[in-house]
Amino acid sequence: MSDGSGKFVIPAKAVAGASTLASIGLLATLAVVVSVQNIDVLSTVALALAIMAFVVQLIVYIIQSISAAQQLQNAQKLHGDMMEVLRGIQEKSTALERTVQLLHDQVIEEFRGKARSERQLGRSSSTELAAIEDSLAALEAPVSLQADRSMTIDPLSVDRQSDQYPPALPVPEAEKMRAELLSWPGPDDYDEVREAWNELPPTMRQSFFVDLRDLLSATNNKHFGPGLSLDPETSPIRKAGLVDKVKGWRLQTPSEKGRRIGRLLTAEGPAPDGFPEDLLRLREEIRDAEEASRARMRNRRD
């Protein structure tokens, strides 16, 4: 009988049955020969027992061989299934590692943006900046599912680092603020915008611009909300009502008034027809000063 793989297989029961019939036939033949030829009975019985023992051993050997072959086949099948499972686990592990590394890099970049703003404004103390640097160093440690187990990173330091800033804004609120910041001031806002910016000293203009950029970045940030270190109460920015204290945090972010007049710097696209030329010049002046300040920071760091 064929097993479908080109091999001819004989069932064990058929072999055992054939062997039994052959033994019975041999014994019958032996009995006939003994009765006809008057051969010694003891010798005949001994020969019959030897034949039967040989047949039994043959049957046992065949059964054991078939059983061993089945066990080997099952082991090979199990090995193939295990290798398939291990390959699937390895593929999922590699994909998970890539995802974790991508999220890790995103968090690092977003938190680094906060740290750069703090350094640029010089609002934080050296102790606070050192804490931020330590947190960044902890986050920048290699992330790998196959990392050396002897390397230990205090998870509390990462949690404390994540608590440096508020959680991300709700999506509807973030989208509303982003749309507001990217739009140009309307005619009803020209006088307020002109007066607010002209009252701020040049250095305070750049400082407030950093607050605006932080808020704009936070509207597209899935990890951190808006907020930079709180200015003193005597700061012209706070006295003018351009920033509010973030509730529950020693941080500040542009107020409703601040967002309204700050659109002069954050708006995108061409200016509307009839937009005042003096406001456009003020926009370019502040943005150019901010870019020059950032360039000096990069040169100093390099």
Image (spheres, rainbow, N blue to C red):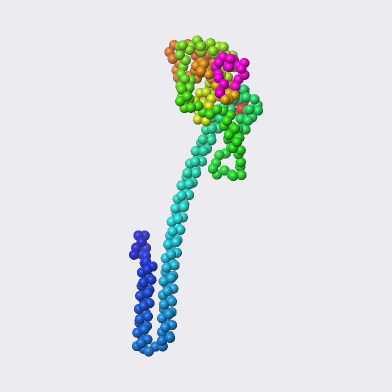
* Front in this rendered view, residue 253 or 191: 253
Tell me where residue 71 appears, x and y as whole percent.
44, 61
Quadrant including the C terminus: top right
Q: Residue at x 48, y 27 (%)?
A: 170
The answer to whether residue 45 is left or right of residue 141 is left
Task: Provide residue 174's location: percent of width, then percent of height.
Answer: 48, 25
Quarter of the image that includes the N terminus: bottom left
Q: Is residue 146 above or below residue 233?
A: below
In the displayed image of the protein, which residue is found farthest to the bottom?
Answer: 38
* Residue 203 located left or right of residue 262: right
Residue 295 in view (yes/no): no
> Which of the 4 image quadrants contains residue 161?
top right
Q: In this orientation, does residue 119 appear?
A: yes
Q: Quadrant of residue 35?
A: bottom left
- Percent of width and height locating residue 273: 43, 13
In the figure, 76 relative to 59: above or below?
A: above
* 240 relative position to 127: left or right: left
What's the magenta region?
A: 229-247
Q: Is residue 233 magenta?
A: yes
